[in-house]
Image (tube, helix red, strand yellow):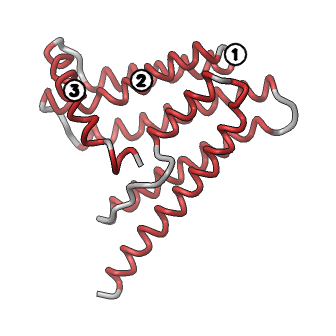
Amino acid sequence: MFDGNWRSAVNRGLDPIGAVLCRMGVSADAVTVFGIAMATVAAVVIGRGELILGLVFLILTGLSDAFDGPIAKASGTSSVRGAFFDSVSDRVCDALLFGGVTWYLGSNEPGHIFMLPAVVMAVSLLVSYQRAKAESLGLDAKGGLMERAERFFVLGAGLAFSFVLIPILWAMLVLTAATAVYRFAKVWRQADSLHTL
């Protein structure tokens, strides 16, 4: 949803900041690595039950992800290698963050509810894989109700208001699964139209 409706507008707002950071000598790779470090810290503090502090590091993770692209663009270092590194780091950060939530629920909630964020993570990986595979085939798999940006915002709300964390995770699971189904159907239609040409 974010990619389809607001990505271009947000990028236009971030590009000048990326140019400033570039002039300060900040590299896109350094920002990406910083994001992984922030996600690691977020996972640890969330796992320990410090959810508000975890929210702070979640925001820092998101900001890093937002700025590495504009910095690369401003420095003229945008490349296939950089895009690959950014994509892999996104998956690493997602795994760390949901791992932290799994750790937290495992320590604080009864039963098997601690598996809920792990399932959300698994479905999220499917959504990301669908896009990557579709793009490798020259098809478009963008869109859906729960892309990565939305997952960040929704998870942040769950950390800010811990009493709704579990309901938010359930909602995230349903919407992420709906996104996976939407993307599958979208790519299937495109592939089918190519097959019938």
Which residue is depicted at the point 39% across and 60% down? 141
User: Mark 1: which secondary structure?
Assistant: loop
Q: Which residue is mark 2?
A: 35
Q: CA distance from mark 3 to mark 2?
A: 14 Å
Residue farthest along the right direction in this orientation:
111
Q: Is residue 121 above or below residue 29?
A: below
As shown in the figure, which amino acid type bears the numbered disc 2?
Answer: Gly
Query: Badge 3 is on which residue?
Result: 71
Residue 185 against residue 29 in the figure, above or below: below
Decide which of 164, 117 is in the foreground and name it.
164
Using the image, tell me which numbered label, if any, was put on residue 48. Answer: 1
**174 relative position to 56: left or right:** right
The circle drawn on residue 160 is none
Residue 59's x, y, as percent?
A: 46, 22
With 41 as the anchor, is 173 left or right in this view?
Answer: right
Number of labelled discs? 3
The disc, 3 or 2, on the residue closer to the chain's N-terminal end is 2
Residue 191, given in percent of the width and then of the height, sits at 38, 75
Q: Mark 3: which amino acid? A: Ile
Amino acid type for the residue under numbered disc 1: Arg
